Image (cartoon, rainbow, N blue to C red):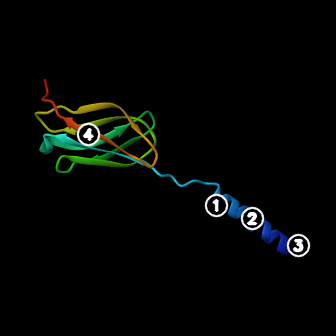
């Protein structure tokens, strides 16, 4: 009888532990870059997180981004400069569309 109670208690604790954790559901950041052939990578950078994705055919989507406030940086090829978009807010489970980012020539 004592062994059955211990087994039941262990099962209850195990079940409570499994249901007490919430699965991480990251957000995403997407957008387009002009000129499309001069953009290499898109970076989402915050004080505690850095995530990146390749730019393909002028579009990007950075996935599994933790909720928070980010700078999005587009890494560019010559003769264009890297470009930054400030204060991009990422919400859990949502995709933030930053729209079109235009690369500027280096000075």
Q: Measure how far apart labels 1 and 4 are at the Cα level.
A: 39 Å
State yes or no: discs 1 and 4 in contact (Cβ < 8 Å).
Answer: no
State yes or no: discs 4 and 3 in contact (Cβ < 8 Å).
Answer: no
State yes or no: discs 2 and 4 in contact (Cβ < 8 Å).
Answer: no
Give the quarter of the image for residue 32: top left
Reading the image, the residue beneath label 2 is 12
Q: Measure how far apart labels 2 and 4 are at the Cα level.
A: 49 Å
How dense is the environment of label 3, judged by Cα within 10 Å: few (below 14), some, or many (20 and up)?
few
Q: Measure how far apart labels 4 and 3 are at the Cα level.
A: 64 Å
Reading the image, the residue beneath label 4 is 99
Which is closer to the viewer, label 3 or label 2? 2
Which corner quadrant holds the C terminus? top left
Q: Is mark 3 on a helix, strand or loop?
A: helix
Q: Measure how far apart labels 3 and 1 are at the Cα level.
A: 25 Å
In the rendered image, residue 64, in percent from the top left (x then y), is placed at: 41, 50
In the rendered image, residue 21, in percent from the top left (x then y), is placed at: 61, 54
Which residue sits at x=79%, y=70%?
A: 8
**Residue at the right extreme of this rendering:** 1
Which corner quadrant holds the N terminus? bottom right
Work out whether mark 3 precedes mark 2 in sequence or the reverse, and give the earlier one: 3
Q: Is mark 2 on a helix, strand or loop?
A: helix
Reading the image, the residue beneath label 1 is 18
Which is closer to the viewer, label 2 or label 4? 4
Q: Nearer the viewer, residue 35 or 77?
A: 35
Which is closer to the viewer, label 3 or label 1? 1
How dense is the environment of label 1, judged by Cα within 10 Å: few (below 14), some, or many (20 and up)?
few
């Amino acid at each position: 009888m004592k062994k059955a109670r211990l087994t039941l208690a262990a099962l209850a604790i195990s079940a409570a532990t499994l249901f007490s954790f919430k699965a991480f559901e990251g957000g995403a950041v997407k957008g387009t870059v002009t000129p499309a052939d001069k953009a290499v990578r898109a970076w989402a950078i915050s004080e505690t997180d850095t995530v990146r994705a390749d730019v393909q055919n002028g579009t990007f989507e950075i996935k599994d981004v933790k909720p928070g406030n980010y700078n999005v940086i587009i890494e560019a090829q010559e003769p264009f400069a890297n470009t930054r978009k400030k204060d991009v807010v990422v919400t859990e489970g949502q995709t933030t569309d930053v729209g079109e980012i235009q690369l500027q020539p280096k000075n």
